[in-house]
Image (cartoon, helix red, strand yellow):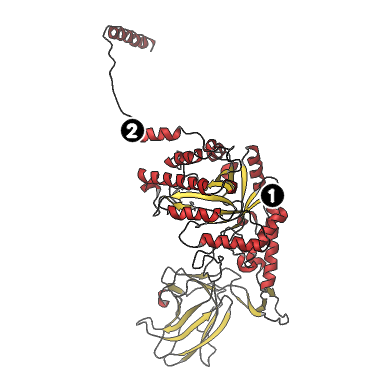
Amino acid sequence: MKRLNRIIGSSLIAGLFLNSCAKHEVLNYSVEKPESIIAQEDIDAYSPLISYIDKKAHPNFKWGVALNMDDYLNKGVMFRLANRNFEEMVMGYEMKHASIVQADGSLNLSKLERLIKAAQENNMQLYGHTLTWHSGQNAAYLNSLIAPVLLPPGSAPVPGGINVPSLSGYALKMTNPSVANAWEAQTAFDPKGLEDNTEYILKITVRGSKAGNIGLDLQETVNYTGDSFGSIAFTTDYKEYELKVKTTALRTRLIINFGQFAGTVFIDNISLKKAGSNVELVPDGDFEKGITGWIGWGNSSTRSQSAVGEGYGGPGGIRVEKTPEEKKTILTEALETFIAGMFSVTKDYVKAWDVVNEPMSDWPDQYALKTGIGKAELAEDEFYWQDYLGKDYAVKAIQLARKYGNPNDILFINDYGLEGSGDKCKGLIAYVNYVESKGAKVDGIGTQMHINSTANKDQIVNMYKLLAATGKMIKVSELDIGLGDNIKTANATAEMYQQQAEMYQFVIEKYFEIIPKAQQYGITIWSPLDSPDRENSYWRRGEPIGIWTESFVRKPAYQAVAEALQKQK
């Protein structure tokens, strides 16, 4: 090995010596730098965004960003990006009711306390979001507070009380995922010994996950003709039904048609007998031993033995509904517990809050409050305080925030779509005036501005003018801008990104131009990064709405935002 190295070394020296005798020429390769790289280098040369705000000219203006709490506590790239570019942060979810209030009503504030400590250590202000909303609520707990009282069996009658059955044992559980024709989801059992021209008595106990209907027939499996028992209209409580039918031909199958009901039906204590006979034609109809012999098909429906405790247990107690006044009192106490708890850990550091979030209806009356009344389905975290506390729910929330907070806290009512073509901005302003007429001072109005680069600029200007005329502090509270038509990152073009940058610049510049300096609370970027196209991406999934890419690369919007901030003096 050593000898080989010496040979190679000698050869290299000789080669270098010979080359040194040749005339040296510099070859000129001229390659122009791509425009895209030049443009990116220009963007990357900009300083952190916060450096472009003239704090002498705008001492009270807050430049904010929305974050996930873990992103800040884990002190990763987002932590550094936020500290470098912004001065105030808001949590997208983790300061909301559902994140704080536990199943038993207790408040878990430990993580929030950690966040406040981290914010203090990094001189990052924290904005409170939000104390009263219809979404992001622990709806299961709140609904449990106002649920009916169930008196035990044998209790004396109560005015307004309703006798309800108890639950016990097992049942046949049938689930249909979507509405179809009645016969497109069926469950069947084939009794032995059915006869022609004979009356049969069917007894059945039924309840559903919601109110609905099922139909029952005796059918012939060869030609599918049958005789109908009729239909049953059921509720969420078990009820016993007795139906009769006289066969007009030989029948071989008992059919339950439930295709028109989307949900779950529980069947128990089913019995089929010939009139005048004690012979049971549907054995084990209490389903305690399972569902042997029961079959079914259609519309991806399922059938199984229920969980224990979901069957019919006979007559139960008396259900007593709480009155509207009782519900109002209970929920007012729950709201106070939540607000008091939040201020117990935030009061010394958080000085501004979205006390009420998204109160106004989208349609048809944008002067009215949102409501859950009449909605067929509510999300698990959906709960409308205003449906129980009434129009003054915001009055009460602000009074509680004043009671437990600081005298000079800045309290906002915040909503989206104020830049739209309808009356929502005027409706919100009217509601703010109403709240103040009841003695609760509202310091500011937040306009979220989840918009697209195709948004109507005249409508944005009009919104700013309406808000400025209120004399309130005005905050652009949740700014992010998509490309329109739900365009995803994969389909975005350079031209689209330039349009997006121009809209970011327009929104910021017009804010400073139209909102008087004394009313300028600040602007918060809701999604600093583009939204990922993943299953767990819940906000504008896959849309390039940020001023950085998902990989933390500055976009043209970054440059536009920096220039818009720099212009303000």
**Tag 2: amino acid:** Pro
In the depicted structure, whether residue 519 falls above or below residue 313: above
Q: Which secondary structure lies at badge 1?
A: loop
- Residue 452 location in percent, x, y? 43, 52
In the depicted structure, whether residue 41 falls above or below residue 93: above
Q: Please give the residue where the numbered disc 2 appears in the rendered image.
A: 34
Q: Residues within 10 Å of mark 1 (few under 14, many from 20)?
A: few
- Residue 38 location in percent, x, y? 38, 32
Q: Residue at x 43, y 50 (%)?
A: 482
Q: Can residue 362 be seen in this view?
A: yes
The quarter of the picture where the N terminus appears is top left
In the depicted structure, whether residue 508 falls above or below residue 369: above
Q: In the figure, residue 181 lies in which quadrant?
A: bottom left
Q: Is residue 453 left or right of residue 241?
A: left
Q: Please give the residue where the numbered disc 1 appears in the rendered image.
A: 408
Q: Residues within 10 Å of mark 2 (few under 14, many from 20)?
A: few
Q: Which secondary structure lies at badge 2?
A: loop
- Residue 179 location in percent, x, y? 44, 72
For the view shown, which residue lies furthest in the left direction? 22
